[in-house]
Image: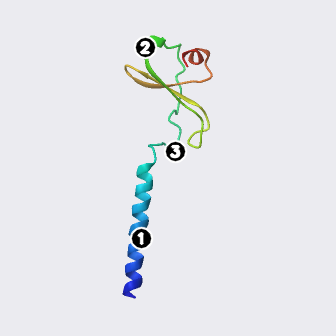
Amino acid sequence: MKFTAAAFVFLTCMTLLSTEVIAARLPNQNLRCNCVKTYLGKPINPKLIQKVQLIPAGPHCRKDEIIATLKNGQTCLNPNDEWVKKII
């Protein structure tokens, strides 16, 4: 009985440790869309955009996402807008 309990505790600990090791090796991925809403205003001057990040559709989100980094923060752009296509 003592051996069974010790084996159970050992296997439980090993399972928890292996799960954490696997999670630590995976890249930091969100499992949901980053863009809840997109920018709908007039076109942003490309000079004001510091960085553009394109996140292709995948298991985390059904649509392509474009995140523009500006001086005052980040905003999500609509990938179907013509001015956004020119920036990319």
Residue at the farthest bottom position: 1
Expressed as whole percent of the image width and height from the top left, the position of residue 9 reads 38, 75
Expressed as whole percent of the image width and height from the top left, the position of residue 49 reads 44, 17
Q: Is residue 15 left or right of residue 64?
A: left
The label on residue 12 is 1
Q: Nearer the viewer, residue 6 or 35?
A: 6
- Using the image, determine if residue 27 lies above or below residue 48: below
Q: Nearer the viewer, residue 58 or 82?
A: 58
Mark sitting earlier along the chain (3/1): 1
Please tell me how crowded label 3 is: few (under 14), some (14-19), or many (20+) other residues with Cα within 10 Å: few
Give the residue at x 37% y 80%.
6
Mark sitting earlier along the chain (1/2): 1
- For the residues labelled 2 and 3, the Cα–Cα distance comes to 30 Å
- For the residues labelled 3 and 1, the Cα–Cα distance comes to 26 Å
Secondary structure, mark 1, is helix
Looking at the rendered structure, the kind of residue marked 3 is: Leu
- Using the image, determine if residue 9 lies above or below residue 79: below
Give the residue at x 60% y 36%.
57
Looking at the rendered structure, the kind of residue marked 1 is: Thr
Expressed as whole percent of the image width and height from the top left, the position of residue 4 reads 42, 83
Mark sitting earlier along the chain (2/3): 3
- For the residues labelled 1 and 2, the Cα–Cα distance comes to 53 Å
Please tell me how crowded label 1 is: few (under 14), some (14-19), or many (20+) other residues with Cα within 10 Å: few
Secondary structure, mark 3, is loop
Looking at the rendered structure, the kind of residue marked 2 is: Leu
Residue with the mark numbered 2:
48
Residue with the mark numbered 3:
31
Expressed as whole percent of the image width and height from the top left, the position of residue 32 reads 52, 42
Q: Is residue 6 left or right of residue 68?
A: left
Q: Nearer the viewer, residue 34 or 50?
A: 50
Colour mode of the rendering: rainbow
Give the residue at x 58% y 39%.
61
